[in-house]
Image (cartoon, rainbow, N blue to C red):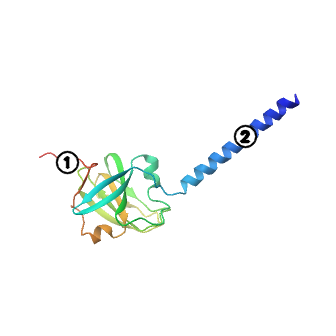
Amino acid sequence: MQAKRQLKNTLLALCLIFVTASSWAQTLSATSPQLTLPRVTLQAGMYQIDAQVASTEDQREVGLMFRPQMPQHEGMLFVFEQPSPQCFWMKNTILPLSAAFIEADGTIVNIEDMKPQTTDSHCSKKPVQFVLEMNQGWFAKKGLKAGAKLTGAPFVTKKP
């Protein structure tokens, strides 16, 4: 009887350790930057962009949160299943960012500068399938504005 009780207590202790470790791991991942997402190369005229791709709901939810820095030629491309109005905010995002709201064919609809650590909404002016976040001012420095076209694998070419 004593051995059964000890085994039961040991199993309960192991379960408690597992649950605590799982909870700790979830908390850690919820406060850590996403650095291992798939990447895609995009072109904005003569400029090349190395973009991480956030294509799942969980990946899009975390986005660039908790990133202390990002190289100038890098960004994050948020991919949605179909065109729809999109709004972004900067909760837990340390970097000042600019977001380009992009149609399925790569055409920029509008660009919004976003202030770090705020919950202000920054929305597309019409339904879009992509949003590209870059360091704040990147689009302006490259002379890119609404109507400019990005190219690369994710964008669908309109047929004439």
Left or right position of 125 against 31 = left
At x 22% / y 63%, what residue is drawn? 46
Left or right position of 53 against 141 = right
Question: Where 114 falls versus 87 (above or below)?
Answer: below
Q: In this figure, which residue is indicated by the disc labeled 1? A: 157
Q: Secondary structure at mark 2?
A: helix
What amino acid is found at the position of numbered circle 1 in the picture? Answer: Thr
* Among the two numbered marks 1 and 2 on one chain, the one whose residue lies closer to the N terminus: 2
Question: Where 143 falls versus 42 (above or below)?
Answer: below
Q: In this figure, which residue is indicated by the disc labeled 2? A: 14
* Image quadrant occupied by the N terminus: top right
Closest to the camera, between mark 1 and mark 2, is: 2
Distance from disc 1 to disc 2, alpha carbons, whole Å, reads 55 Å
Residue 116 x, y percent position in the rendering: 45, 67
Q: Point out the residue furthest to the left here.
A: 160
Residue 71 x, y percent position in the rendering: 39, 65
Q: Point out the residue furthest to the top here.
A: 1
At x 28% / y 72%, what residue is drawn? 141
How would you rate the neighbour count of disc 1 (Cα within 10 Å): few for under 14, some for 14-19, many for 20 or more?
Answer: few
